[in-house]
Image (spheres, rainbow, N blue to C red):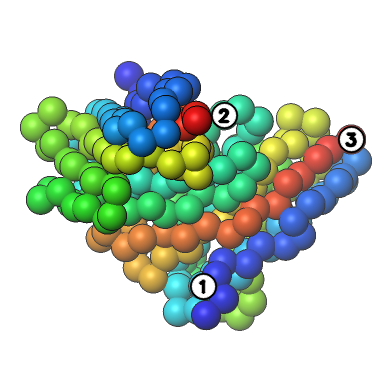
Amino acid sequence: NAGVMQNPRHLVRRRGQEARLRCSPMKGHSHVYWYRQLPEEGLKFMVYLQKENIIDESGMPKERFSAEFPKEGPSILRIQQVVRGDSAAYFCASSITGTGGNAEAFFGQGTRLTVV
Amino acid sequence: RKEVEQDPGPFNVPEGATVAFNCTYSNSASQSFFWYRQDCRKEPKLLMSVYSSGNEDGRFTAQLNRASQYISLLIRDSKLSDSATYLCAITGGGNKLTFGTGTQLKVEL
């Protein structure tokens, strides 16, 4: 049973370009969470999705960031017109049910985005 | 007040020592509690869930104190390989998992 798969592992974008980060949850998991981690800082919640629905996007910046989790295929975190401040590690996690019910969330290896 | 707070450390301990970390939370409605371990530049890895009755996994023991709103992690007989950052994570209503900033542990010879 493969774990949470994220790709690419490393992504370099020039300022103004778009970044697309992909996350395939563990088999059987329908709950997906995205987190951002700046160097030397903690994990900041961005968005929580279930299949085809955004459940909680309270941590998403108001502009340029969007997320989806379609019926088929991986979850996508999209960052438009990237700026240097977007450089960070982006982690995806998945759980079989919501973590509020004590379900454990497992993380992918992350995508390290560098904006040059 | 932050939703979840941890002492950043670092905690420098000799091999074989017992070390304990606490993590306080502000939302009394919090339902689920976890400890994760994160090595430098790696993803967080689930260490254990934390239950009201407390739970133990080998050298690791986790406790929950709802009255004082904190969870703890005790590591006995520390190994060099335990050196990492330990993150507490709490669900405060709903399914949003909020992390503390982590406590850094360095186990030395």
Query: The disc labelled 2 sits on which kind of residue?
Result: Glu
What residue appears at the point 13 percent right and 28 percent down from the top-left corner? B68
Task: Give the quadrant of residue A5.
Answer: bottom right
Cα separation between marks 3 and 1: 32 Å
Q: Does label 3 or label 1 sit earlier along the sequence?
A: 1
Q: Is residue B76 left or right of residue A61?
A: left
Give the foreground label among 3 and 1.
1
Subunit ID for the residue under disc 2: A
Residue B27 shows in this picture: no
Q: Is residue B85 left or right of residue A19?
A: left
Tag on residue B69? none
Few, some or many residues within 10 Å of mark 3 (<14, 14–19, 20+) = few
Tag on residue A41? 2
Residue B84 shows in this picture: yes
Q: Are marks 3 and 1 on the same chain?
A: yes
With respect to residue B61, does B6 lie above or below? above
**Quadrant including the C terminus of chain A:** top right
With respect to residue A101, does A39 lie above or below? above
Query: The disc labelled 1 sits on which kind of residue?
Result: Met
Cα separation between marks 2 and 1: 26 Å
Residue assigned mark 1: A26
Subunit ID for the residue under disc 3: A
Give the foreground label among 3 and 2.
2
- Where residue A85 appears, as percent x and y from the top left, is 74, 30
Of B89 and B27, nearer the camera is B89
Residue assigned mark 3: A116
Q: Does label 3 or label 2 sit earlier along the sequence?
A: 2
- Label 3 sits on a secondary structure element that is loop
- Where residue B37 appears, as percent x and y from the top left, is 46, 45
